[in-house]
Amino acid sequence: MADTRDIEVTVNGESHAANVETRTSLGDFLRHGLGLTGTHMGCEHGVCGACTVMVDGEAVRSCLMLAVQTNGHEVTTVEGLAEDDGTLSPLQEAFWKHHGLQCGFCTPGMLTSLTAFLRDNPDPSERDVREAISGNICRCTGYQGIVDAALDVAKTMQKGS
Amino acid sequence: MKPAPFIYHDPATPEEAVALLSQHEDAKVLAGGQSLMPMLNMRFVLPDHVIDLNGVAGISGVVDSGSTLEIGAMTRQRDLVRDPAVNAKIPIMPEALEHVGHFQTRNRGTIGGSLCHLDPSAELPCLMAAYDAVLSAHGPDGVRDIPFTEWPLAYMIPTLGPDELLTKITVPYWSANHGYGFVEFARRHGDFALIAVAALLETDGDTILQASISIGGAGVRPVRLAEAEAALVGGNIGADAFKAAAEVARGIDAMSDAYVSSAYRQRLAATLVERALIKAGERAKGSA
Ligand SMILES: Cc1cc2nc3c(=O)[nH]c(=O)nc-3n(C[C@@H](O)[C@H](O)[C@H](O)COP(=O)(O)OP(=O)(O)OC[C@H]3O[C@@H](n4cnc5c(N)ncnc54)[C@H](O)[C@@H]3O)c2cc1C
Ligand code: FES
Ligand code: FES
């Protein structure tokens, strides 16, 4: 018989109670359990970064965490980055402006990773940004647009503060 | 790409975790999951029981004993990078950790997990060898201390009984004036190193009083360059002495694999030992 547990987890500000099979990854739970398909599963062994979400504000691989481990914790997915009315976050806006995405497969992981990174490093160099996304693989853009977007939003945030 | 079914346990104390390990035949301990979860997902390992350490009390955090840092096995790699005591006493550790995966994997990955996983080219085992760290294992009969030289048993297998848990790592630190350098070569940033080198130097200004050189990635366990360390002590910091140490490194036993040859690893070892020593020499302030 499948080993299951009851969990309570807050996802994008909304509390969810669910019964999960303990071997279910956080990524699969978000997609199949909650229908939040913004989080993309690529390699499922920690290498591509597409599945990155924030748990208690820190960027982590959702393919390398079990859903049961988020019991009592807060998860933010790409769906939780924009305002409730759909207004894009400054980083999302900058991705749009700088063509930081093409097919969009890597984008959720890029956005969640860089959202956490820029919060901790508000004034990064280009090298810092490239290092921050060194664990996120993009097959389309060549990264330049993504790096430009991150640097642009950092600059704007600096001016604003 | 999904783990095979297992029964999940989340003990609250080391004793409970050890009891679970003793009770269950085919159990695997889950720390940060950054190495174990990929192996579960790919079904390289198929344990009947998974014992999650993330809720176990008292096995994470850093304590300064006055001459050592005592690091809980479940301390996250990212917390070590940011820890004030680590930055003050073992500044080489954050430098080494920058090479361990990516900030997202360091947010979950632990020091204990890395030392138990014992990948031949992992950075933390190489660093613990440089410091002669002592690892504390908690078993059914209590706690035993294992010097790092005895820790690696074979390829990716530490000296740890099936019902033992690594709980603490004790790192004797060097004076505030010591110099250090951690350098490695990997094919992509964040990859496991082909060769990694940790170097530590203690000086009185010019003369070298103590030296430690550890090489990771050459074989199944990190190699200490004892001969080169001994030759450095008593001499001065300088290009010639560092070149001589590099020549010793060129002679180490090194494995070859599908990617690079043994000779290439030896050459890398020589180059990186010299670079690590130069860095350490520049940073050594002299403890006069
Ligand atoms: C993309 C990517 C890149 C990476 N790059 C590097 C790199 O460059 N260098 C590097 O060193 N590592 C790298 N890693 C692996 C590193 O991130 C892991 O953190 C580390 O190898 C294992 O630590 P963990 O806490 O995640 O342990 P887990 O994956 O949970 O466990 C690893 C093994 O150790 C055992 N174990 C864990 N803790 C204990 C304990 N306290 N007592 C007994 N047994 C225990 C587990 O049973 C398991 O067999 C990378 C990982 C990823 C996903
Ligand atoms: S799907 Fe998680 S890192 Fe690739
Ligand atoms: S936009 Fe296609 S993978 Fe990055």
Image: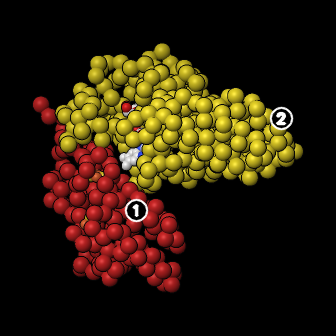
Chain colours: A red, B yellow
Mark nearest the camera among 2 and 1 is 2
Q: Is residue B79 above or below residue B249?
A: below
The chain carrying label 2 is B
The chain carrying label 1 is A
Secondary structure state at the residue bearing disc 2: loop
* Residue bearing the label numbered 2: B234
Q: Is residue A117 above or below residue A60?
A: below
Instruction: Same chain for labels 2 and 1? Say yes or no.
Output: no
Q: Is residue A149 visible?
A: yes
In which quadrant of the rendered view does residue B266 lie? top right
Q: Position of residue B120 (x, y in %)?
A: 46, 34
Q: Amino acid at mark 1?
A: Ile
B234 horizontally vs A131: left or right: right
Secondary structure state at the residue bearing disc 1: loop
Q: Is residue A41 above or below residue B63?
A: below
In which quadrant of the rendered view does residue B248 lie? top right
Q: Amino acid at mark 2?
A: Gly
Q: Position of residue B149 (x, y in %)?
A: 58, 24
